[in-house]
Each structure stands twice: as structure tokens, then as C-alpha cells.
Amino acid sequence: MKIKKIGLLFVFILFIPLYANYSSASFIISFEGNSGGRLYAAASANYLLDGSTGENSGNSVSPDFEVNSGWYYTVSSDDVPPEAVSGIFAVTLAGGNIKISWAAVIDKESFTRAYRVYRSVKQNDEGLLLAQTESLEYTDVAGLIFGINYYYRVKSVDMAGNPSITGNLVITALSGSLSTSVTALLVNSKQGGRLDLSWPAVSGITSYRIYRSTAAGDKGVRVSTVNAPNCSLSETIGSGLFDAVRYFYTAQGVDADGNEQQQGNNQGSAVCDASGPAMPAVFSVTHPDSAVSTDNCPGFFWAEVEDFKAPAGGATGVRGYYYCLSRNSAEIFGANWIFINELSVSFKNILDGDWFFYVLAMDRADNISSVVFRKIVIKTTGSVSGCLTDSEGRTFLKDSRVDLLSSLVAVRKSRTDLAGNYSFAEVPFGNYRLRIYKAGYNPLDSEEFTLSKSQTLVLLNKTVSAVLNIGVEGVAVYPNPCRTSLLTFVYKVEAPAKVFIDIYDASGCHVAGIQEFQALTGFRETRWDASGMLSGVYFYIVKLETGGNIFRFPVKKFSLIR
């Protein structure tokens, strides 16, 4: 401690009186000089006045003053903080309060005048000053919240007002809950910045007072009252919330007599999140944007995005992603979109055409980002079409079967229309042949052709030679076997003739006969309704009568299957 002995000095203390015991203040020390005038020392704090004030004699205001008599004073300067508090201890009481106690501190310069108690919800923060007390214990009853870790710091203060600075112990404690405390308040962030509060009902409570704060451990201000049995509340931007701010809520029960349970209630918090996360950027390795690709198994990936209003701790606030593959160039987010937690997706066997892949991010409050899309063009198939006629080119081969062969295996089947036209659409790229069927004719295979990215359309017109492709007997029936009710007999007519067709069952009994006249030559057809016939094997013979002569074709057989 520094001691200054000041002789022949008059000490004038501004604003406060001098007392016989110790005190501290900021004051000015002044003394009288010679005819050169009055001199002043600098204003200082942390001074202790030692002794009694007594009386002053002489002219204390004269610019030229010589002390004849008076009192002398000793002014002690104390700027050394006292020792740190030790032996601090905290305990939770039955009523939910927290009691702190500590050991006494002896100040070497003067005496310890009081102790200052601070409380914080963060370990490294000094926090708020709760009280200054001369006692060695303090009970915290200031609206403690259940489930919050409180950190207490105690500082000793000496007679000069110096607080201990370093080495003050920090101790943590949890407030206890009571039977009428709300200890399970939940707060959830919802779309558009809404915060939903919910809690279990408490027996004996008629209403709940809801408090809101922007600081953990601080009860804040009352924002609403919810009457039992309701145990929920929603707050929105319109009710005073601000986007991107974390709010802390406490619910305190009130009984029928108006008593409010201010102790032991837990605190719930959530971020007011009124906007969506960042928009993901989507890419495709397999399909360049808008360029034609022959790959019908596209894959897409996107970079993980962050939600800037994510919960503390560094984790992303994005719940996941929704995607959709559509032919629509203006797709709207809806129920057909698929949710995924991954950052990539792939598709298989997608049909040809223009496609649009959409993706968006959704945060934990169900806010969605802007939609991003990527256009791809798939072209893995072509088409084959043409017209079939007879060898003379006079007759279209209508209702004739046409197969599309790949490596001599039929991969697609078609039939000609009334004008002899056939077509195959969306045929995968590759090498193919046509196989043409006509009743009574041998199958006709076309030359090989190729569908590719550079050749997506093949037009193949064919004529079917009756001479080369009908069976050697010159007569046929189709379909054979027949699963329908209509059979068609085919035969060659050299000159206008009367036609006789006789049909026999397997036992040789005659079951039907057909007669008609064919005026045109060439391969002709006669249709027969077999709906009255039973399943089984049948035989038929075709005879032509012309100029008194009869020409018989070989006996042939067919099967009916019912």
C-alpha cells in the first residue's frame, strides 16, 4: 500500500462529506500555495481517508495564505485488488432456487467490504450482476429456468471499491423443477417463419403465460396467455418475430388463484426461418445440357447447399432434396416430386425425347429453395415404316403380318393396314431385317438395315412375289392353327373359274362346302366362318372348274383351337 504524508494541507472533498470511518470516493486534493496562486492536484479515485476530519482554521480561500494552525491528514492510496474468492459451492434447493456459498477473503491493504455475485449461461462470460452482499452466501431466486446450466462468479470488493479481477472461481448449477413447472416445452421452426410451441398439460394449472427472449437463460417478456386445456401456441412474422433470429420461450403455469409458477420451467428455442435455403446447382456427366445423347440411363448430381439460418453447431439446416424428371418444361413442385437425402440420382431406360430434370432443397422448417432444372435430349431409337404390295404392284397386301428381326429373332410384330402400310416406332438403335408373312406364301426376309443416331428413320417398301413365295402346292389357309372364328383360304387362279372348297373333319365326314366364282386371275382369297365348328383337326380341298375342266389342289389340313 502506498502512503502519502501531506503536511500543511487542506483537503477539500467535493460532493461527499468526510466520515470518521473508511470510505471511498473520487475527489480532488487541493492545497494553498504562496502568492503565486492556488495549485490543484489531479482528480483521483481509490483513496482512503485515515483519521478524524477535525476543524480547519485560517483563511481557506485567500489567494495568499500562510497556515498558522490546522489539522494534518493522512491520505492512503489503495489500487490493489483483493484476493480472489475461493471455496465457492452451489446447491439446488427443494424449491428450485440455487444457493451459492464461499469462503471469506482477507484484504491485505484494507478490509473486504462486500461480495458481488454474477450469473451467466455461458462459462466464459462474466454475466449479469445479481447482487452485492456482505454475507458469505447468496440464494438465486431470479426466475431460474429448468434445464439451463448457470455459471456463477463471485468477486470480493475492498473498502476502496477494488473488485478482485483474476482467479475468481466459476461454478455451474442446474435449477430444479417443481410439480407445477412446465419442463417439456418444445419449439419447432416451420415454413414461412412460424414457430410452433407445445408442452404437456400440468395438473392444477388454469392458464399458461408465455415469455419470449432472444437470449438463452433470459425469460424475456410475456407475449401471450394460453388458457388450459390448450397447450400450444404459434407465433409468426406478423406477431413480432424477425427472420433469422433465434427465440427462446418459457411457459409458466398459473393456478386458479392467479399464482404463477416462476421456478423450474424449461426453455425451448428455435430459429425464425422465413425463407428457403440456397438453390442447388445440378450437373450431369452422362448428358450435356440440351445436347442429344444416345444414353437412355441419365444420371444427375448436385452440390450440397447450406441453410444460413441453420441451428448452431455447424450442421446443415437442409432436410433434403426433392427432384422430378418430366417432359414438362414448366414443372411445378407437387406431390409427384420425390424426396431424397442423397446428392445424386440416376434413371434407367428413359424413352426418347426432351426431358427436364428439376431439383430443389428443403430446410428443416419446410421452406423450399428456388427450383433449378437441366434439360437433356435422349435419342436411342428410330422408326421403320413402308408399304407392301403383290408382285404386280396392283394389290396392297392388307392385314399381313410383318416381324422386325434382330439377329433372326423377332423383337417386334405388326400388321399392314388396308393400304398395305406398316410401321414400327421407338425401335432401339441396331441392325434389323423385316420378315413378311402372307397366307399361302413362304415368309419373305428383307435386306438388313441399320438404325442409328445418324439414321433414325428407315422407309422400306416391299413387293411380295407370288411365284417365289407361295407354298409349292399353290394353296394355303391362315391363320393356322386358328383361334378365332374366321379362316382365309388362298389359291392361285390362272383363268376365271368356279371355286369349290370342301371341308372334312378328322373322321372323313364332310362338314362344310363353299362355292364362288373368281373372275380375276392371280392369287385369290375366300373367307369362311368356322364359329360353328368344334376344336380339332380338319382337312380341306380346293377345286377350280374352268372350260369344263376341273383342277384339284392337294389336300391340306388346319386346326381349330377353342
Image (tube, rainbow, N blue to C red):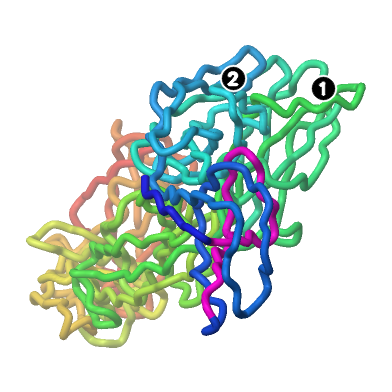
Q: Quadrant of residue 94?
A: top right
* Quadrant occupied by the C terminus: top left
- Say which label, 1 or 2, has the lower sequence index: 2
Q: Position of residue 66 (x, y in %)?
A: 57, 70
Relative vertical location of residue 8 with respect to residue 385 in this rendering, above or below: above
Pick the residue in front: 148 or 37. 37
Q: Quadrant of residue 176?
A: top right
Relative vertical location of residue 378 with respect to residue 191 in this rendering, above or below: below
Q: Position of residue 229 (x, y in %)?
A: 82, 27
* Quadrant occupied by the N terminus: top left
Q: Which of pointers 1 and 2 indicates the residue nearer the eye?
A: 2
Pick the residue in front: 126 or 309. 126
Work out whether residue 460 can be spotted.
no
Residue at 67% from the left image edge and 33% from the top image edge: 142
Q: Position of residue 162 (x, y in %)?
A: 47, 46
- In the rendered image, the residue lying farthest to the front is 68
Q: Quadrant of residue 398?
A: bottom left
Residue at 52% from the left image edge and 60% from the top image edge: 8
Mark 2, Cα crowd under 10 Å, few <14 / some 14-19 / many 20+, is: many
Give the main secondary structure of the magenta stretch: loop
Q: Which residue is mark 1?
A: 205
> Mark 1: which amino acid?
Ile
Circle 1 sits in a helix, a strand or a loop, which is it? loop
> Mark 2: which amino acid?
Gly
Pick the residue in front: 93 or 383. 93
Q: Decide if residue 265 is on the left or right side of residue 153.
A: right
Q: Which residue is mark 2?
A: 176
The stretch in magenta equals: 9-34
